[in-house]
Image: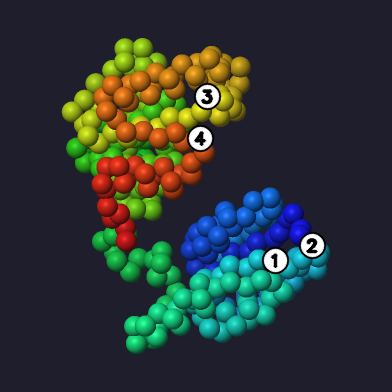
Amino acid sequence: MSKSRHVFFLSDRTGITAETLGNGLLTQFDGIDFIKATKPFINTPEKAQAMVEYIGHVAEDSGVRPLVFSTTVSDEIRTILRGANGFFLDLFDTFVPSLETELGAESTHAAGRAHGVSDPMRYSNRIEAMNFALEHDDGQSTKRLDAADLILVGPSRVGKTPASLYLALQHGVFAMNFPLTEDDLEMMQLPKSLRGHEHKLFGLTNDADRLHQIRTERRPGSRYASLNQCSYELRAAEQLYRKFNVPFVNSANMSIEEMATLAMQEKNIRRHSF
């Protein structure tokens, strides 16, 4: 078996659904180097044919046919793409016919429903949540703490910002994040502005070696990035979480999606964007 394989995520819209489907399946296979490419907005026969030719060139050059994950709604475009020299998997081919049979109804074949703006109110909520996350990133504002669904806390560079942005964009959750400073950790106290909001807190930590690596990329040779400093801050943060009964997770080997889901589950926060 080849140790590398080209993978294409094809869509007539953004490609997010194809990526989610494909990457979820590919995580089950270790030892293979997947060379991934997302090709969105394949929404005309001409674009589809050009994509088929390109996949054919990749197959010829690599000596093995690529994997192709598709979420194109158009039957015409999907038929063209299916002719590519690749292992073709399509979400609509796989699931829509069975659903049509079960529901006794035909699908609309409307592109963009998964990530579109078919519900303006929910879309607007996601935009508001994103603005909230940006405004309150890294504790830069505490004006609207009462509006927060969730407050992520932790030492610098443990994943607070990407998790809060993901929660906002993907689920419409009003999430803010707040750093635990060295003073907070030495005094073993939560930042004053967060007191009274303990029920909204969710903590993040990391492995010392991993945090050392991340901080070194940002500030090489600094005390901030030293392994001793990283180890101290992480130990103190966990002590602080336990002192104030703040649930927390280690983000070292966890995806943003997993962190966000655990935080929502722990705080019983429902998804607003679906």
Above or below residue 158? Residue 149 is below
Reading the chain from its start, which is encountered first: label 3 or label 4? 3
Disc nearest the viewer among 4 and 2: 4
Looking at the image, is mark 3 or mark 2 earlier in the sequence? 2
Residue at numbered disc 2: 62
Amino acid type, residue under disc 3 in the picture: Ala
Check disc 2 and report its element: helix, strand or loop: helix
Q: In the image, 189: left or right of 37?
A: left
- Residue at x-position 61% and y-position 17%: 221
Residue sticking out furthest to the top: 186
Q: CA distance from mark 1 to mark 4?
A: 31 Å
- The Cα–Cα distance between marks 1 and 3, rounded to whole angstroms, is 39 Å
Dots 3, 4 in contact, CB < 8 A:
no
User: Residue visible at 29% across and 66% down?
Assistant: 119
Cα separation between marks 3 and 2: 40 Å
Q: Residue 179: where, in percent of width, then height?
A: 37, 26
- Residue 72: % across, % down: 52, 74
Q: Is residue 109 left or right of residue 35?
A: left
Question: What percent of the width, then of the height, locates residue 60?
Answer: 80, 68
Specify the label residue 66 is tagged with. 1
Q: Which residue is mark 4?
A: 252
Q: Earlier in the sequence, mark 4 or mark 2?
A: 2
Badge 3 marks a residue whose secondary structure is helix
Front residue of this view, candidates 148 and 254: 254
Dot 1 and dot 2 residues touching (CB under 8 Å): yes
Residue 24 location (% of width, % of height): 52, 57
Quadrant of the rendering where the C terminus is positioned? bottom left
Q: State the CA–CA distance, disc 1 to disc 2.
A: 9 Å
State whether residue 140 appears in this view: no
Residue where numbered disc 3 is placed: 208
